[in-house]
Amino acid sequence: MENKSVNACKLSIVVPVYRSALILPRLVEQIAAEMRQAGLAENFELLLVNDASPDNSWQVIRSLAQDNPFIKGITLRRNFGQHNAIMAGLNHVRGDFIVLMDDDLQHPPQAIANMVRALSEGYDVCYTKYLNRQHAAWKKLGSQFNDWVATRLLNKPKGLYLSSFKAIRKDIADEIIKYNGPYAYVDGLILDTTRSITTIDIEHQARDEGEGNYNLRRSLSLWLKMATSFSVVPLRLATLMGFTLAALSAVMIIFVIVQKILHPELPAGWASLIATVLFIGGMQTVFIGLIGEYLGRAYLKLNHKPQFVIGSTTWTGTKQNDQAGI
């Protein structure tokens, strides 16, 4: 009965592509083989979204689309980032269930059938949890920090790992793409939409070619997007710190006055005064910058900064074209 429920579905797989020209043929081959084994060969589409990759990824996608009718290729006019590229793909999916995965073969296609089966059981979202992460130590530490922050800022269920390899139902995707802001964060949008979430364990595979595209700068940018686009907790923290510093300043003023009354011979504390001024000034600068980040994002959204801009696709007509294979 389980196999029948899986086979009866229509599946869309969305893969953002960046610097993966050499990997894509193997990725397509492995996904196609797994779909045949799972009985989904006639009921799936693979959307490859080229995020303005500087190599010849778009040429490879076009070639693969000519040979494989289940492939739909999209290329963006400039680099918008992984999550924005995913949003571009979600705007063109037609499957009942959607799988989001990376282009580096670290996400095993063999897990797709189990993810789809979890959604068939009634869950809205299925995340994957790595049993043996093939990432550098700094990435693992950064992921732990991101998990800690997401738990507090996004009210993420404790213990849920926000993997980039996940599956969602079509109605959840329809809610997600209603967000038209320029700073998309897919996991934040998912957590804003539903709490019907499950997880499955997978083996994290080593990257076949090259190095990962997420360096420290991109990771910090993603964290800042999560912190300032989907939560007001940092602003509340700034308010709390303001009250705390004000209270601490009042206590220090009382202390200085009492000390001066009891010991009039004590000289004025130049060093402590400078330290206090620098500390308060530094905190003020940090939180003014934080408020500016919020205002800047609101300003760009009001001015309709695009979430993504599609350059061309491998099919013609509207997104309901029948060439995709489902």
Image: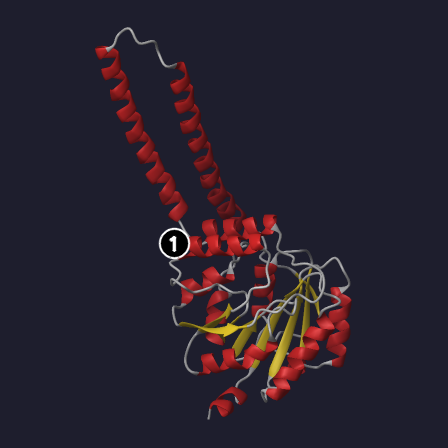
Q: Is residue 246 left or right of residue 12?
A: left
| SS assignment at label 1 | helix
Position above or below: 255 against 65: above
**Where is residue 58 shown, x and y percent of the image?**
74, 66
Q: Is residue 221 above or below residue 247?
A: below
Residue designated by label 1? 152
Residue pictured at 21% horizontal, 12% vertical:
262
Q: In front: 306, or 284?
A: 284
Look at the image and tell me in which quarter the C terminus lies.
bottom right
Please state if 16 lies on the left or on the right of 64 as rendered. left
Which amino acid, mark 1? Arg
Residue at coordinates 36% horizontally, 44% vertically from top-left? Answer: 236
From this view, report whether residue 171 is shown above or below residue 133: below
The residue nearer to you, when weighing 116 against 202, is: 202
Residue at the extreme top:
265
Q: Is residue 234 visible?
A: yes
Identity of the residue drawn at 40% across and 68% down? 194
Give percent across and percent down for residue 289: 48, 37
> On the rendered structure, is 94 left or right of 53?
left
